[in-house]
Amino acid sequence: MLGNKKSIDCKRGKYAENEFFNFLQSTEEHTEIILRDYFYWDIELINGKSITKYEIKLDDFSYEIYEDNTVVSDDGYGTLLIEFESEGKPSGISTTKADFFVIVVKKSKEFWIIKTENLKRVILMNEKYIQLCGDNNSSRAYLILKEKNRKFFEIIKYGDGKYTREIPHSIQYRLE
C-alpha cells in the first residue's frame, strides 16, 4: 500500500513539474529546458553557458492558522507548505541546491517563485508553524502565511495555457 501511495505522490509531483516546465517553455528565452529526476533540483533552464536550477513542489493541501496557533485545512488559501524533513531525514528546503524554489499551488492555480536563499530567510523571519504531512505523516514542513509573505514572491497565475504575472511588490523587499 505504501508503494502505491508513493506512486500517487510521484504523479502529483510530476503534475507540478510539468506545469512549470510548460510555463518556462512558453515564456522564457532558453537554449534548452531539462526535466530532471534528481534529489537536489527538478528543472534546469539552459541559456548559452548559464544554467538556472529550479526546485518544484506541489502544494495542494493548505492550512489556516488561527490566533491561538491551531491549524486547520483552509481549502488552499492561507499558507504555503515547505517540506524540510521526510522519514527522519532532511529533504525539500533543507537539501535543495536549486537557484529558485517554486511552489505550485494547485487549488488557486499559481506559481509562487522565490530565490531559494531568500525562502530560507523568509522561514527564519517567521514564527515556526510546523505541520506533519506526507505518507503516514512521515514528513514535516513549515507553514508560511501567504498574505504576510507574498511580497517576497513572484506569483504567476496559470491555466488554459495562459500565464498572468502578479506585479511583485518584492522588488522593494529583496532579502539580499
Image: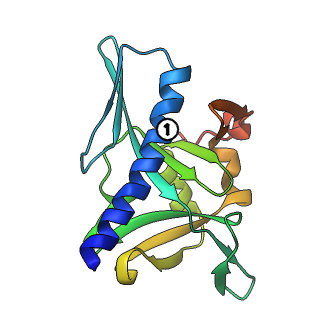
Residue displayed at 39% across by 49% down: 14
Q: Secondary structure at mark 1?
A: helix
Which quarter of the figure has residue 72? bottom right
Name above or below for residue 43 compared with residue 45.
Answer: below
Name above or below for residue 4 compared with residue 101.
Answer: below
In front: 88, or 133? 133
Name above or below for residue 63 compared with residue 93.
Answer: below
Q: Callout 1, which amino acid?
A: Phe
Identify the residue under disc 1.
20
Q: Where's residue 46, x and y in %?
A: 34, 20
Q: Where's residue 135, x and y in %?
A: 36, 77
Which quarter of the figure has residue 18? top left
**Lateral position of residue 79 relative to residue 121, left or right:** right
Any part of residue 8 in sight: yes
Residue displayed at 48% across by 24% down: 25
Which quarter of the figure has residue 165? top right
Quadrant occupied by the N terminus? bottom left
**Lateral position of residue 144 relative to residue 138, left or right:** right
10 Å neighbourhood of mark 1: few (<14), some, or many (≥20)? Answer: many
Q: Where's residue 22, x and y in %?
A: 49, 31
Number of numbered callouts drawn: 1
What color scheme is it? rainbow
**Lateral position of residue 144 relative to residue 148, left or right:** left
Q: Where's residue 88, x and y in %?
A: 26, 77
In front: 4, or 57? 4
Residue displayed at 70% across by 46% down: 151
Any part of residue 120 in sight: no
**Lateral position of residue 8 relative to residue 158, left or right:** left
Residue displayed at 49% across by 27% down: 24
